[in-house]
Image (cartoon, coloured by chain):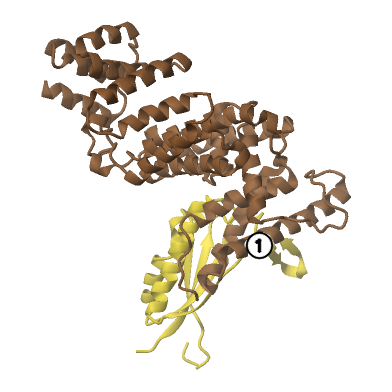
């Protein structure tokens, strides 16, 4: 069975929402358990959080704005890459992502392009 | 990746430490900024730790990040202030090497001073408790709203006004002068007492939250005891009281959240370690010549830790209630005194005394009368319990009263 890599991208509806310290710790624990569960199946490739502060958006003609806040509220909070046998398996992984507890938040599942001509 | 687990409540614990230290450095008028920096620090952890692993020393990691965030913010603010001559008023030292001291000593000092500032008599008691929960205990707005059975908007407004007052009244983070410590401690103790009661008697269904509030009140009280200047007998008496009460935490609520009355509690669920601690602090409180309401209430709570009904026990409880009512009247104390009286002198005498109290808008008044009449006059017992039922607002307590009526 061939494995493909998929990127799971966490989109937050409102990245500026402040949660309580206790809540943040709970999310952290859940995130670690979620990633740990994927890693235990040897299907975790890599991942990172994307801090909101200092973020910039470069636009057409090189216009730089502080962002992504302002025009759009939705922001990307982080991403992980997993190995999966099918997009459905990757979707199952995504369903467990604690980010989805926030109303309006989504996890986008995208296949990573392979450089072997198969796509 | 390190496999170690994060300490439970680490973020909450570190929130209050970081906020206290930052307020000490920048003034309590910048408490919102301090809270933001602390929250952003945890956000950074949330964005890093799950992927890179928990750092060797999570606390030190958080402090470094908080310090950097504070310094960056200051740099930005001073730029802003230079340009517009206005902005957050923070005095930045000339060499812009601002020292944020996160040593254990400064953390403790800052928290103690914060305790005095938050419990400033200028603030309403409600505001003091909300501020204490937020700044001194690190509770979120949701959690505070839940504990007060209120909503986020109300709590936010309350906190906003309280912080405005701290700012406009120019309240400083400092230790009161030695001559004023005892006097300034009074509102602090009242707030800690109420904070504890809020957790103990709250009708909120969230047992963990209620328990946490009690533990926080005890932690803050112990902080005062650990400091030589503030460890006066009253503070020790208050902690003793909290220990005795919380020893019954597990036993006093049933599976459906209904209150289990003292005489019906399973005493094997009482926490003996807390009882022992209570006795320890009550002994430490028994020096000097001031008897406070906390001494008396701790004494009453002490006798309640003995399950067996003896004449000595109830006689002592009665006398302590008599004294307590003289210095600090409350309907609850009056009703409890009458219960003790019944135990010592019998129900007939207690009924006469009870009916003099005339607390006709208090459901406990009618429950007490119902109890006292039960062995004497079933009709009157039922009448009273029905009146209690009519003014009782919570479902679990209605059940308890209904059961009493059914048993008659």
Q: Specify the quadrant that holds the C terminus of chain B.
A: top left
In the image, is residue B386 above or below residue B396? above
Residue of label 1: B65
Query: Could you say which chain is coloured yellow in the image?
Result: A
Query: Could you say which chain is coloured brown in the image?
Result: B
Q: Which percent across, then down, holds residue B10?
A: 51, 57
In the image, is residue A32 above or below residue B176? below
Does dot 1 land on a helix, a strand or a loop?
helix
Quick one: B123 or B189, which is closer to the camera? B189
Q: Which percent across, then down, holds residue B401?
A: 22, 24
Q: Which percent across, then down, holds residue B326?
A: 45, 14
Disc 1 chain ID: B
**Which quadrant of the structure image shows residue A90?**
bottom left
In the image, is residue A1 above or below residue B84? below
Quick one: B286 or B67, which is closer to the camera? B286
> Seen in the image, is B42 located left or right of residue B214?
right
Q: Residue at x 12, y 13 (%)?
A: B378
- Extreme bottom residue here? A116
Q: Residue at x 77, y 54 (%)?
A: B74
Q: Which residue is drawn at 75% across and 65% down?
A: A64
Quick one: B187 or B254, which is closer to the camera? B187
In the image, is residue B134 above or below residue B353? below
């Amino acid at each position: 069975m061939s494995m493909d890599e998929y990127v799971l991208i966490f989109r937050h509806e409102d990245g500026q929402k402040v949660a309580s310290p206790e809540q943040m710790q709970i999310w952290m624990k859940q995130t670690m358990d979620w990633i740990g569960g994927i890693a235990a199946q040897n299907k975790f490739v890599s991942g990172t959080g994307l801090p909101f502060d200092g973020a910039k958006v470069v636009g057409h003609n090189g216009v730089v704005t502080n962002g992504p806040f302002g025009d759009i509220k939705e922001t990307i909070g982080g991403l992980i890459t997993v190995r999966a046998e099918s997009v459905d398996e990757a979707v199952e992984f995504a369903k467990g992502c604690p980010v989805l507890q926030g109303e309006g938040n989504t996890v986008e599942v995208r296949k990573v392009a392979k450089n072997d001509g198969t796509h | 990746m390190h496999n170690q687990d994060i300490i439970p409540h680490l973020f909450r614990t570190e929130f209050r430490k970081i906020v206290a230290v930052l307020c000490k450095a920048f003034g309590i008028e910048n408490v919102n900024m301090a809270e933001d920096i602390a929250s952003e620090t945890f956000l950074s952890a949330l964005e890093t730790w799950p992927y890179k692993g928990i750092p060797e020393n999570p606390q030190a990691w958080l402090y470094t990040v908080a310090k950097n965030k504070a310094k960056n913010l200051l740099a930005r603010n001073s730029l802003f202030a230079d340009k517009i001559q206005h902005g957050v008023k923070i005095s930045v030292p000339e060499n812009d090497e601002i020292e944020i001291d996160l040593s254990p000593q400064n953390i403790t000092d800052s928290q103690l001073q914060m305790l005095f500032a938050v419990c400033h008599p200028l603030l309403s008691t409600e505001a003091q408790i909300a501020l204490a929960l937020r700044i001194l205990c690190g509770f979120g707005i949701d959690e505070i709203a839940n504990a007060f059975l209120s909503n986020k908007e109300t709590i936010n407004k309350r906190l906003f006004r309280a912080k405005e007052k701290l700012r406009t009244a120019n309240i400083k983070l400092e230790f009161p002068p030695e001559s004023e410590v005892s006097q300034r401690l009074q509102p602090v103790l009242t707030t800690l007492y109420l904070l504890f009661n809020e957790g103990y008697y709250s009708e909120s269904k969230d047992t963990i939250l209620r328990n946490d509030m009690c533990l926080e009140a005890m932690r803050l009280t112990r902080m005062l005891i650990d400091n030589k200047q503030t460890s006066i007998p009253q503070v020790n008496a208050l902690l003793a009281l909290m220990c005795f009460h919380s020893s019954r935490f597990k036993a006093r609520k049933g599976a459906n959240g209904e209150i289990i009355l003292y005489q019906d509690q399973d005493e094997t669920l009482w926490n003996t370690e807390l009882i022992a601690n209570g006795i320890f602090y009550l002994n430490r409180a028994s020096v000097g010549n001031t008897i406070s309401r906390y001494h008396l209430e701790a004494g009453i709570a002490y006798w309640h830790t003995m399950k067996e009904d003896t004449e000595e026990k109830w006689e002592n409880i009665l006398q302590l209630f008599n004294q307590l009512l003289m210095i600090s009247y409350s309907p609850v104390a009056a009703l409890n005194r009458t219960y003790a009286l019944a135990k010592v002198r019998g129900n007939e005498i207690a009924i006469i005394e009870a009916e003099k109290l005339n607390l006709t808008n208090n459901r406990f008044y009618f429950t007490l009368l119902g109890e006292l009449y039960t062995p004497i006059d079933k009709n009157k017992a039922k009448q009273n319990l029905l009146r209690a039922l009519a003014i009782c607002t919570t479902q679990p307590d209605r059940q308890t009263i209904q059961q009493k009526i059914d048993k008659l």
